[in-house]
Amino acid sequence: MRKFVDRIDEMATLEEQFVSSEAAMVVIYGRRRVGKTALITEFLKGKRSLYFLATEESEEQNRVAFQRQVAGLTGDQVLSDASVGSWDILFDRLTEGDKRLVIALDEFQYLGKANPAFPSIFQRIWDTLLSKRNVMVILCGSLISLMESQTLSYDSPLYGRRTAQIRLGQVPFSFYAQFHPAVRTERNLIELYSVTGGVPKYIESLKSSHDVYEAISKNVLNRNSYLLDEPNFLLSKEVNEVGSYFSILKAIAAGNRKGGDIAAAMNVRQTGLTKYLKVLERLDILEREVPITELNPEKSKKGLYRIKDNYLRFWFRFVFPNLGLLETGHASEVLKLIKRNFVDGQVAYVYEGICRDRMWSLGAEGKLPFVPERVGRWWGAKDVEVDVVALSTQQRRAAFGECKFWSRPVGVNVLERLEGQAAAALRDKAFAPYAGKPTYVLFSVSGFTDSLKHQAQNREDVLLVG
């Protein structure tokens, strides 16, 4: 049985809406496989509820299916056999009585896709009926663009009706070990996370394998695995011109992170990419990253694009360029290529993101001399780049971090290099508001040398995180 992990804040929001004395409408949306249905299912346990999964069939077929469930919940045999041509009648019958009822409409966007007028129909039902009854409605969907247009945008008939909304993201790495009942090393967990990210469906698929390469071979490179075609499945549901989006993601995964470099790799004009990049950002697939000191990120000319989703980054970096080999039965050759570049080309990059999340936790736990207001990366001229930077404007302090996914312990030389990079960064005018004494944080998956541990014990400005 799949274990339910994390979603603490989301569950708290749902429970708060449930105990309200007023009618509630909660919109839950997010990319496919991220665990929206699992969240709803867990929340509905022990509650009087009706869960309805809409399909891509016609509105009439969906209404007939909904009618059967209403009849089953209410025990209304007459309704079960009747011909009903109105949603209003069904919702009216369903919500009779005083006891709190939860109605969860999953894949809600398919109802609006089958009938573009359905959001207006549901608005009328809400305004005239449901809003006056002891009911909590959950509208859930996995097609982000459609859910936004049908339920959240200003132009939507349902705009202003929701009492809460949840955009469900991936499970953070800090909860990742809970998916794996077997004892695993931190290194092994990070390697697996670098492929699955925090997508519960992917985690479940790979968790039976103790070796990351075995997991990749069995679940990704296998021509019968759903993961092999997953990026095409995800994007084809959201966008047209899938090929253009694939080309962009392939270019970024290959290391082209500036807008101009992406355009050059694709042999197109940079201005022609803007709309595609914006769509990928809105779908939470792509992120435009700027140095942490930038005060106006949208206007910054230093923006770099990165693929947020670990699996998509892995797939476009290692699988997409080698589909020909896979289709001709040479999966073993592809696995050799992956082994050659997996740690430096994927895991080390993902580990930096894990360390940035940990920097937030260090501040919250009082292990830093200040509580960060911002955490991110920083880069400047002359090849100066810092993996993790935490900033506090109020206390005029900065912490600089270095992340090493090595097979050997980190030594004093890494600290010295970080101090040099930090000194160069602090000479940049962007760090003028953070002129206080810096803190140095070293992250290592393989521990630290005795000499570095000794030095850290005698310095208040050095923190080692294993």
Image (cartoon, grey):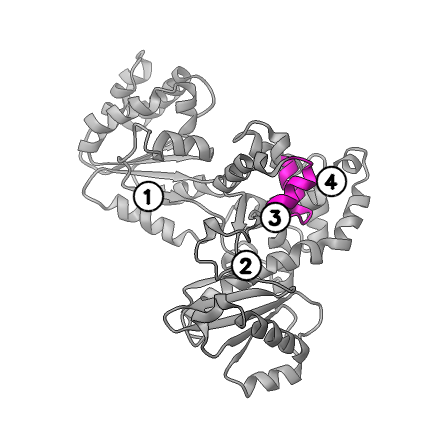
The amino acid at mark 2 is Ala
Circles 3, 1 touching at the beta carbon (< 8 Å): no
What residue is shown at x 37% (from left), y 53% (from top)?
Answer: 9
In front of the other: label 3 or label 1? Answer: 3
Q: Main secondary structure of the magenta part?
A: helix
Q: Give the residue pinned by disc 3.
A: 258
What residue is shown at x 56% (from left), y 47% (from top)?
Answer: 309
| Residue 321 tag number | 4
Quadrant position of the C terminus in the picture: bottom right
Q: Magenta stretch: residue 254 in it?
A: yes
Distance (Cα) linking label 2 and label 1:
28 Å
Q: Is residue 145 visible?
A: yes
Relative to 265, is 297 on the left or the right? left
Circle 2 — which element?
helix
In front of the other: label 2 or label 1? Answer: 2
Distance (Cα) linking label 2 and label 3:
34 Å
Farthest residue to the front: give it: 429
> Who comes first in sequence, dot 2 or dot 4?
2
| x and y, in percent, of residue 274 in the image | 54, 38
The amino acid at mark 3 is Lys
Q: Give the residue pinned by disc 2.
A: 177
The amino acid at mark 1 is Gly
- Is 424 above or below relative to 77? below
Q: Give the residue pinned by disc 1.
A: 46
> Who comes first in sequence, dot 2 or dot 1?
1
Circle 4 — which element?
helix
Distance (Cα) linking label 1 and label 4:
48 Å
The residue stretch that appears in magenta: 246-268
Question: Is 434 or 466 nearer to us in this picture?
Answer: 434
What residue is shown at x 37% (from left), y 44% (from top)?
Answer: 166
